[in-house]
Image (tube, grey):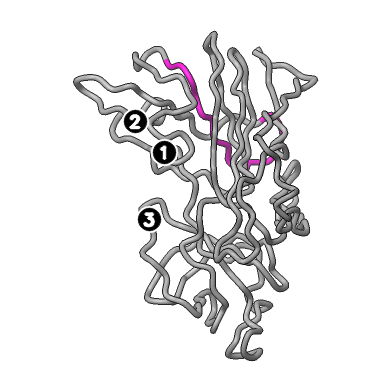
């Protein structure tokens, strides 16, 4: 089975208004080839629930300047869009009014500027963003081959645990879309577990997953979302017992003029990897 890597830089902005209250929208499409593994990473994020400045910080509790809508069932994360931690992704574990509780991981939250400590308009700009999920990336099984027999799985989505040390890691979980029958509802299931659908399974930012097509026909994934205008911090997986690292990148996207927008959306290009798997 060939393994393919898609270059996701070839997606086309479809909206870029500098005075818009939200990030520019964009779309990309990926050809998921038959009898192949396709490595996928999502360069777009879902529309933010709110973008605001940081008012105060107490430990890992962050108070924002604006009200925050209720979080969706799949949860959300805080994206730091300015300041010393620009590009940091902080999982949100609780929300009370305008105050979020986050998991800092390896980040030092004391370096975040707040308006209460650093002055008006000096607080870090942050966004609260819902996670991508299997249901939002592949709604109703769009872009995959639905399985009609639980013993003969067609398209599989493989997830990987970034904390596992080494290369050529095995999948930590495998999901597939079941067409449904008289016993089980249509939806995403984890392989070996039909106790509940798993459509709200998170696809975290700056991570990859693999789409395995053990079938004879291609499918196409088309996704629309928001362009991240801030810098990015990409986790670097550990290949030795050393602690995982993150790599910072400046913003890759700036608000273009209308003349910069392409008239149509080009397809992404695929490149065969030099190695193959059985």
Residue at the extreme right of the image, as rendered: 274
Q: Secondary structure at mark 3?
A: loop
The disc label shown at residue 127, or none? none
Cα gap from disc 3 to disc 2, whole angstroms: 19 Å
The front one of 249 and 163 is 249
Secondary element type, mark 1: helix
Asked if labels 1 and 3 touch by Cβ distance under 8 angstroms, the answer is: no
Residue under the point 65% across and 63% down? 18
Q: Residues within 10 Å of mark 1 (few under 14, many from 20)?
A: some
In three-dimensional space, the C-alpha distance between marks 2 and 1, rounded to whole angstroms, equals 8 Å
State yes or no: discs 2 and 1 in contact (Cβ < 8 Å).
Answer: yes
- Picture coordinates of residue 101, whole percent (x, y): 47, 70
Label 3 Cα neighbours within 10 Å, binned few <14 / some 14-19 / many ≥20? few
- Left or right relative to 183: residue 198: right
Mark 3 or mark 1: name the one nearer the start of the chain: 3
Q: Which residue in the structure is indicated by mark 3?
A: 72
Residue 238: x and y in percent read 72, 45
The residue closer to the viewer here, 247 or 193, is: 247
Give the residue pinned by disc 2.
Answer: 187
Q: Position of residue 120 (x, y in %)?
A: 62, 89
Which of disc 2 and disc 3 is earlier in sequence?
Answer: 3
**Region of the chain picked out in magenta, as a range:** 153-168
Question: Does 56 appear above or below 190?
Answer: below
Question: According to the image, label 1 marks what residue?
Answer: 135
Q: Image point 64% across, 48% down: which residue?
A: 206
Asked if the magenta segment contains residue 160, the reply would be yes
Q: Which residue is nearer to you in this view: 264 or 235? A: 264
């Amino acid at each position: 089975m060939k393994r393919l890597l898609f270059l996701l830089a070839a997606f086309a902005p479809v909206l870029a208004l500098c005075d818009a209250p939200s990030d520019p929208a964009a779309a990309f499409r990926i050809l998921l080839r038959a009898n192949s593994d396709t490595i996928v990473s999502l360069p777009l994020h879902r529309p933010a629930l709110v973008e605001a400045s940081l008012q105060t910080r107490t430990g890992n509790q962050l108070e924002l300047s604006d009200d925050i809508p209720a979080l969706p069932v799949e949860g959300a994360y805080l994206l730091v869009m300015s300041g010393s931690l620009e590009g940091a992704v902080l999982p949100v574990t609780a929300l009370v009014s305008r105050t979020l509780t986050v998991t800092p991981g390896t980040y030092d939250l004391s370096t975040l500027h707040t308006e209460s400590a650093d002055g008006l308009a000096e607080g870090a700009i942050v966004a609260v963003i819902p996670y991508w999920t299997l249901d939002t990336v592949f709604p109703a099984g769009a872009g995959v081959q639905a399985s009609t027999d639980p013993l003969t799985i067609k398209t599989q989505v493989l997830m990987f645990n970034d904390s596992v040390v080494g290369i050529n890691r095995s999948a930590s979980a495998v999901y597939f879309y079941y067409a449904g029958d008289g016993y089980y509802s249509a939806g995403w299931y984890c392989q070996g577990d039909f106790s509940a659908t798993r459509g709200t399974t998170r696809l975290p930012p700056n991570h990859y997953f693999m789409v395995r097509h053990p079938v004879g026909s291609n499918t196409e994934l088309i996704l629309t979302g928001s362009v991240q205008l801030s810098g990015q911090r990409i986790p670097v997986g550990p290949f030795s017992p050393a602690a995982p690292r993150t790599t910072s990148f400046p913003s890759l996207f700036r608000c273009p003029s209308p003349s910069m927008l392409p008239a149509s959306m080009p397809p992404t290009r695929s490149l065969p990897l030099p190695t193959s798997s059985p």
